[in-house]
Amino acid sequence: MRLNINAADGMPIYRQLIEQITLLLATGQLKQGDELPPVRVLAQELIINPNTVARAYRELEQAGLLELRQGAGSYVSGAGSPLAKKERRKRLLARVDVLLAEASQLAFTLEEVLELIQTRHAAFQQPGRKRNDESSE
């Protein structure tokens, strides 16, 4: 598990940890039953206060994503799956919003956007086909 902290981000470090661990869960890089690094180990690795890691772990536990077992460690709980789908959907919706806003600014209709999406999706389904070709119109 590789986490990166950016002190200049403006987002509190514990929130950065929560976001990154949630993303690892949503993408399946962390699975039910996986053990997370101990609080002190992760704090040393990231060069941050152990209380910061403990806070992130506690909030993830309250969200039902982690199980904190006294003396045994922190593990991904079985409740990770539904939230994983919810998190993936949330991230995709944010990108859809950006796409629709830009399409509107560029004067594309919804039908034109959907056609482009279908064309690109078809390109991704065909192995060996160039995916970064611009359509000729």
Image (cartoon, rainbow, N blue to C red):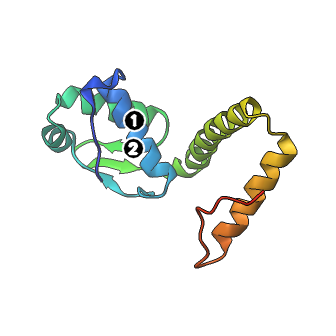
Q: Position of residue 66 (x, y in %)?
A: 41, 43
Local crowd size for mark 1, using a 10 Å CA cut-off: few (<14), some (14–19), many (≥20): some
Position above or below: 31 against 77? below
Closer to us: 21 or 69: 21
What residue is pinned by disc 2?
21
Residue at point 17%, 28% (across, down) = 49
On the image, numbered disc 1 is attached to which residue? Answer: 18
| Residue at (45% x, 32% y) in the render | 62
Task: Give the residue type that dot 2 points to.
Answer: Ile
Taking the view exactly as shown, the residue that stands out farthest to the bottom is 128
Q: Do labels 2 and 1 touch, CB within 8 Å?
A: yes
Query: 68 or 107, which lies in front?
Result: 107
- Amino acid type, label 1: Ile
In this rendering, does residue 108 appear at all?
yes
Q: Secondary structure at mark 2?
A: helix
Is residue 26 toward the left or the right of residue 108 in the image? left
The C terminus: image quadrant: bottom right
Q: Name the spot of residue 102 as percent of width and height, x first.
A: 68, 34
At horizontal 49% and vertical 54% (from top left) the residue drawn is 27
Is residue 89 depicted above or below 47 in this figure? below
Residue count near mark 2 (Cα–Cα under 10 Å), binned few <14, some 14–19, many ≥20: many
